[in-house]
Amino acid sequence: MVPRRCGVLLLFLHTLRAATVLEKKLIISKLGDNAKLSCIYHAGGKLHLNNLRVYWQVADDQEKCPVVHALISGQDNESEQCIHFKNRTQLLWDRLENGDFSLLLLNVSQSDERTYKCIILQKTEYTKVIHQEEVVLSLAASYSQPILSGPIRNTNSGGEEVTFSCRSSNGYPEPNVYWINKTDNRHLPPSELKITPHTDGTYSVFSTLKIKATSNMRIECSIENKILQENLSANYTQEKINNCSNTESQTDLQRKRQGAQAAGIVSIVILIAILAVLACWLRRRRSSQLVSYKDVQTNEDKGEFSSPV
């Protein structure tokens, strides 16, 4: 019986390592999100989990610890799970009997960007593989809206060299950066391209473009994230800059007018106040003079009556 068991074990290992061409599913997740690794077995009815073993593992023969998650006889088995995946994996328990053995991988990071294999084994007289799937997990993060800075020119004369700069951040993986002359949709080579990694795994990008200035410059900076199929762009248009300048000039003129009007109002208020004070002063003076005249008249009248005959 011992040789037979060894033969069964060798057959089992050979079955697991057999070069089987599997259709790989691509799963795209953003950094820090929870990724769902799909594994569906169409059994045609309810499954008896007690007769099944389900292994999620890293599809790399060189991996020292390949086990991501294990389900044995309907129970999670963490004895062989790699420490990198501890407390980060979940099966969808309400769907297992229907053949849905998809795995939820929590809080994904760059180290999770791998190819995973789902293996379902059934125990009858001997253990056999009844289903296998491979899932490729690709991670991505959206870049911020690019900021395009360009020279603000006071004249429309062309010929001098000008520099544009474009920056974006917090994206993954490394982006493609395009400079485009929108007047003829011609791609322009960047003068400088700098991609900086951050501690959280994302990147920042900074690029410059040096060209000869024209009177109708229309420049676009485009940041492409191929994984997410995102293409964010920022535009510089000379006419828009002029319009902005005109708008700013009109705003300044309007502010000056408002300031002049306010100063005029303040001057009128001050003048009215001065006139009011002056009127009060004149009234008081006239009142005092009138009192003095009455006193003099009274004294004169008294003197006339008291003079001897």
Image (spheres, rainbow, N blue to C red):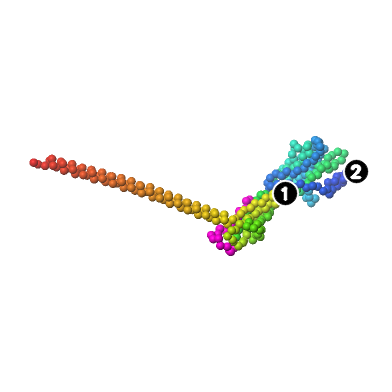
Task: Work out which residue is located at the far bottom of the displayed protein and give it.
Answer: 159
Q: Are marks 1 and 2 in contact (CB under 8 Å)?
A: no
**First reached walking from the N terminus: tag 1 or tag 2:** 2
Q: Residue at x 83, y 42 (%)?
A: 130
Instruction: Give, as a three-letter code, the residue at label 2.
Output: Arg
Q: Quadrant of residue 192?
A: bottom right
- In the image, residue 108 lies at what x, y percent? 70, 46
Q: In this rendered view, identify the residue nearer to me: 295 or 241.
A: 241
Q: Which quadrant of the structure image shows residue 37?
A: top right
> Who is closer to the viewer here, 16 or 248?
248
Q: Is residue 303 above or below residue 225?
A: above
Residue at image position (58%, 64%) is 159
Q: Is residue 156 magenta?
A: yes
Query: In the rendered view of the protein, which quadrant contains the N terminus?
Result: top right
Please tell me which residue is depicted at 79% across the width and 45% down the height of the picture: 133
- Indicate the position of residue 278 as horizontal and vertical percent values: 31, 47
Overall secondary structure of the magenta section: loop
Where residue 131 appears, x then y in whole percent? 81, 43
Quadrant of the snapshot with the C terminus: top left
**SS label for mark 2:** helix
Marks 1 and 2, Cα distance to the nearest angstrom?
A: 43 Å
Q: Say which amino acid is labelled 1.
A: Ser
Q: Residues within 10 Å of mark 2 (few under 14, many from 20)?
A: few
Residue identified by numbered label 1? 138
Residue 194 visible in rendering: no
The residue range painted magenta reads 144-162
* Residue bearing the label numbered 2: 4
Q: Position of residue 224 (x, y in %)?
A: 67, 53
Residue 183 seen from this side: yes
Going by the image, does 162 lie left or right of 12? left
